Image: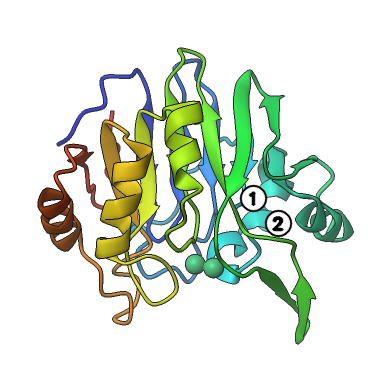
């Protein structure tokens, strides 16, 4: 098992859902889609506490369980302004809206919203509702460790700013292709970001998401990118 050696625990819950426990014991949930997620670990969600929820965009494969879990655990829900308005109408009262380029402190963690190239909407009662622009996050932990969650995105030169400005230790990148970057693009993203570790996600959920960690490793090797690819099984905590 790969190790971050950063006093944190990161568990992939399949697709783009992650459960991170910080050095200070805060529980962070990213893009919760658990019910109906074919990659969600057998036995259901191990979630028993959520202090902070990060939502990259409105698509159901990222927000499917957001309202339910926000109601149950009352985390601070970080999202863009449009998603904040939508979630408030759904009864989520603990939102902390922001927009790209900004940073805020949430539960003792720093959260920076960064650019992503993707669409975004909610499906609500048969209607398609505007959900602002898709985004990524750089999460700063109590011990200075930084984790970049790219969200759903294509390759963009803006990732160079993520590398030079925020210098993340861990980069969580989509590799499934079709709706996001595939391995080839993700290898270039890894090069721009320059994190020590790369955690691939948004692959294997459906047959159409064809990217694999093995192909990512091959593309990175061909590019001379030395970041270590850490690809856990869903439900397997990385520490
Ligand atoms: Ni999406
Ligand atoms: Mn998606």
Q: How many other residues sit within 10 Å of disc 2, few (<14), some (14-19) or many (≥20)?
A: some
**Marks 1 and 2, Cα distance to the nearest angstrom?**
6 Å
Dot 1: element: helix
Residue 26 placement (x, y as % from top left): 54, 24
Q: Measured along the vertical axis of the image, is residue 32 above or below residue 109? A: below
Q: Measured along the vertical axis of the image, is residue 23 above or below residue 52? A: above
Residue that badge 1 annotates: 69
Dot 2: element: helix
At 69% from the left and 42% from the top, the residue drawn is 78
**Viewer can see residue 217:** yes
Q: Quadrant of residue 214?
A: bottom left
At 21% from the left and 42% from the top, the residue drawn is 230
Residue 79 placement (x, y as % from top left): 70, 48
Q: How many other residues sit within 10 Å of disc 1, few (<14), some (14-19) or many (≥20)?
A: some
208 or 45: which is nearer to us? 208
Residue 29 placement (x, y as % from top left): 54, 42
**Viewer can see residue 235:** no
Q: Quadrant of the N terminus?
A: top left
Q: Number of callouts in the render?
A: 2
Residue that badge 2 annotates: 67
At 45% from the left and 63% from the top, the residue drawn is 154
Q: Quadrant of residue 202?
A: bottom left
Horizontal side of 225 relative to 63 (left or right) equals left
Q: Are marks 1 and 2 in contact (CB under 8 Å)?
A: yes
Horizontal side of 215 relative to 148 (left or right) equals left
Label 2 CB-ligand 1 distance < 8 A = no
Image disc number at residue 80: none
């Amino acid at each position: 098992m790969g190790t971050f050696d950063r006093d944190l625990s990161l568990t992939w819950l399949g697709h783009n859902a992650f459960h991170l426990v910080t050095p200070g014991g805060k529980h962070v949930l990213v893009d919760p889609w658990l019910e109906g997620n074919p990659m969600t670990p057998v036995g259901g969600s191990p979630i028993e506490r959520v202090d902070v929820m990060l939502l990259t965009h409105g698509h159901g494969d990222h927000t499917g369980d957001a309202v339910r879990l926000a109601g149950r655990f009352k985390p601070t829900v970080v999202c863009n302004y449009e998603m904040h308005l939508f979630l408030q109408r759904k009864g989520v009262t603990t939102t902390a809206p922001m927009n790209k380029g900004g940073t805020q402190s949430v539960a003792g963690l720093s959260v920076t919203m960064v650019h992503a190239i993707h669409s975004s909407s909610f499906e609500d009662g048969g209607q398609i509702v505007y959900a602002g622009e898709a985004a990524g996050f750089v999460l700063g932990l109590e011990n200075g460790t930084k984790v970049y969650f790219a969200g759903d995105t294509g390759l963009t030169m803006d990732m160079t700013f993520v590398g030079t400005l925020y210098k993340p230790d861990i980069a969580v990148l989509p590799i499934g292709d079709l709706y996001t970057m595939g391995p080839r693009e993700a290898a270039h993203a890894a090069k721009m970001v320059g994190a020590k570790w790369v955690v691939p996600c948004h692959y294997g959920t459906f047959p159409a998401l064809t990217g694999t960690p093995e192909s990512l490793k091959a593309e990175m090797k061909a590019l001379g990118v030395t970041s270590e690819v850490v690809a856990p099984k869903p439900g397997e905590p990385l520490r």
